[in-house]
Image (cartoon, coloured by chain):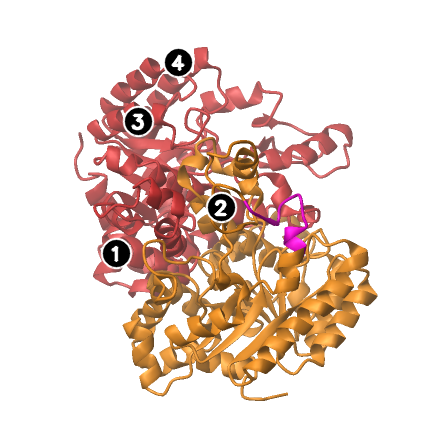
Chain colours: A red, B orange
Amino acid sequence: MAALAAMSMCNMTVVDIHTHMYPPSYIDILQSRVSIPLVRTFPQAPEPRLILLQSEAQSLDEAQHDPNAKPPGRPLTSHYTSLDQKIHFMDTHHIDISVISLANPWLDFVDASASGGVAESVNNEFSDMCSRHPNRLFFFGTLPLTAPLDTIKSSITHLKGLRYCRGVILGTSGLGQGLDDPRLLPIFEALADARLTIFLHPHYGLPNDVWGPRSEDYGHVLALALGFPMETTIAVTRMYLAGVFDKVRDLRMILAHSGGTLPFLAGRIESCILHDGQLVREGKVGKDRRSVWDVLKEQVYLDAVIYSDVGLKAAIDASGNDRLLFGTDHPFFPPLESDEQGTWASVSMNADAVNKAVGEGSANAKAIMGGNAVRILRLDQKE
Amino acid sequence: MAALAAMSMCNMTVVDIHTHMYPPSYIDILQSRVSIPLVRTFPQAPEPRLILLQSEAQSLDEAQHDPNAKPPGRPLTSHYTSLDQKIHFMDTHHIDISVISLANPWLDFVDASASGGVAESVNNEFSDMCSRHPNRLFFFGTLPLTAPLDTIKSSITHLKGLRYCRGVILGTSGLGQGLDDPRLLPIFEALADARLTIFLHPHYGLPNDVWGPRSEDYGHVLALALGFPMETTIAVTRMYLAGVFDKVRDLRMILAHSGGTLPFLAGRIESCILHDGQLVREGKVGKDRRSVWDVLKEQVYLDAVIYSDVGLKAAIDASGNDRLLFGTDHPFFPPLESDEQGTWASVSMNADAVNKAVGEGSANAKAIMGGNAVRILRLDQKE
């Protein structure tokens, strides 16, 4: 963690905008469930297991029938649930401010009748956590997307009134049909009006069969390394093609994992649009069309959770040094062979990438490590 | 085409390594078929239509039942089939040498009993085309992957003896179970022994349902702009995780579309491997492991068909200025609103990206535009 320690010494504010928690009430819900996502205890594991992904269904089934099978999912450590642990993690990594958010899959699976109440309770819990560390914590709220539109709008009004709330974390399913669903437009408008930034985050990945018959040999690598960023890219490209960014010009959206793969593929997307007979015939490719590049520079921000300077430089080239935001993805990707209370390689990989891409101690490094987040999310205003 | 004209004037050899054809015998096969891929004539269109993608099934069905429905697929112009047209296209765009290849989906759909003979005939046709323009054309051959192993090996022996053959074009399905299939190892070994470079090219994309219920509104953009590069990325990551690059150290592979998204995601893939409990437990993450970055710099080449300097710079950062290879993807992505006999925007976008990324007229531009291809594919040897 030498890099982050040095940053801290040179009077830089380090902000982590990609950092998750499952507060106690949410864990209670996961423990009461019988299908994924769920939390369950197995005789073969010392800690309860957190099972989030559909790709874990088979190992869940095996562990339920065979006490010698390896436990499914990941251990539900205090890193997922404890505010003290979050603060300890921040201190260890010289992070000044964290913008915490509920981890996936949020309230996507909650019954319509319950989700409004659950969202209110979860958002109040996040608000309370922030108020206990008023100079160090802000949060992205959670919307009850399975509830009727009025309930969702009430939730936005609630979040707008919460002092430390700066946006909402959003998955890619929207109301169940993706983020290009026109029924979402009033929600995007309400979020833009409330100056709540969307943090777009993947969860569903891609259908299991795209990974092929030997994918079990590869752990979670394919689903997490490829499925997650591809899901984000597909979601935001669908939004772009549906004209959402034009229809809601004040919409602001942070894309997880440096945009999935959007910075790398933006040129190909543009070319495919310009060469698509149907879109040209329908007049969707007009002279006043804002390109994907325009949206990347005007309405989109990218986190810097990309684990290499190669990807980070492409993200900066696409969106701008003033639009990249450092993050850790804590508590996911803990170190496997060292103490979880110490420094995490997954954090230093991303901090090192910033230094390598823009120069340690440079103005751009300071911006990406925290300055941009303070400005974009108004973290210097105690609203 | 000012950029390519200027390149031509400054004594640079321009090589197009990503350029396809459907020779007459292959068109005959497509015309005889009743399911996709196929070629068919419709009363509502002046030219026969080339229908390649499963995502075109619905519009094919509609056009068969409704003479007013828009014709499916794309017009089968002479750009797909005529050697004279290929040479005209090369001249128009100041391309000195083309390494031509059969376009997707190759022989993936041909019966096992027939594919050996079809491969021989198609490869001989490509060989004959090259011999008609001996200073200007080389080719990547086609393997009969549905045939028994011995037939595939015979095909490699045949290709090795063809003077203008420099490799094989390969889809991602392999023998039907992907390129991480251990049954492919003897084929990869035979190709490496024969010094035949693999040109890995997508065709299948991703399952239609990942594009959501409104994807018809977006033409072919999602399937082509996102599905194709994601397919390539998944295929080569599966190969990497299966250890194919370690097992066949002399394997050399050009990845279409600048590696799909591999340069951008390589950091995340590495991080996910290092943090995967299963892979670490199984000892797959050892000290002597070659990383994805190593493979990108030692065994992989990337074409420069990426339509932006942002993506191209990431590809160069990942693999090296000496490993990028200019290409056009002709005859796909023709201009929609200007004469197909003139210059194509899809070509100039990629040439402009090279100039913008490494500087017009620079040594690196010369390398990417042709010098690398001449060296890597031995185009100065008339073997």
> Are discs 4 and 3 both within one chain?
yes
Q: Looking at the image, is mark 2 or mark 4 nearer the viewer?
A: 2
Mark 1: secondary structure: helix
Pointer 3 with pointer 1, Cβ within 8 A: no
Indicate which disc, 4 or 3, sits on the residue closer to the N terminus.
Answer: 4
Q: Are marks 1 and 4 on the same chain?
A: yes
Circles 4 and 3, Cβ within 8 Å, touching? The answer is no
Residue at numbered disc 2 = B223
Q: Quadrant of the N terminus of chain A?
A: bottom left
Quadrant of the image containing the C terminus of chain A: top left
Amino acid under disc 3: Leu
Determine the chain carrying the residue at label 2: B
Nearer-the-camera pick, B161 or A98: B161
Element class at badge 4: helix
The correct choice, above or below, for B7 with respect to B260 in the image is below
Residue A117: assigned label? 4
Q: Which amino acid, by three-letter code, is at mark 4? A: Gly
Q: Where are the magenta residues, as a range?
A: B29-41
Q: Position of residue B24 (x, y in %)?
A: 62, 63
Image x and y of residue B289, in percent: 62, 66
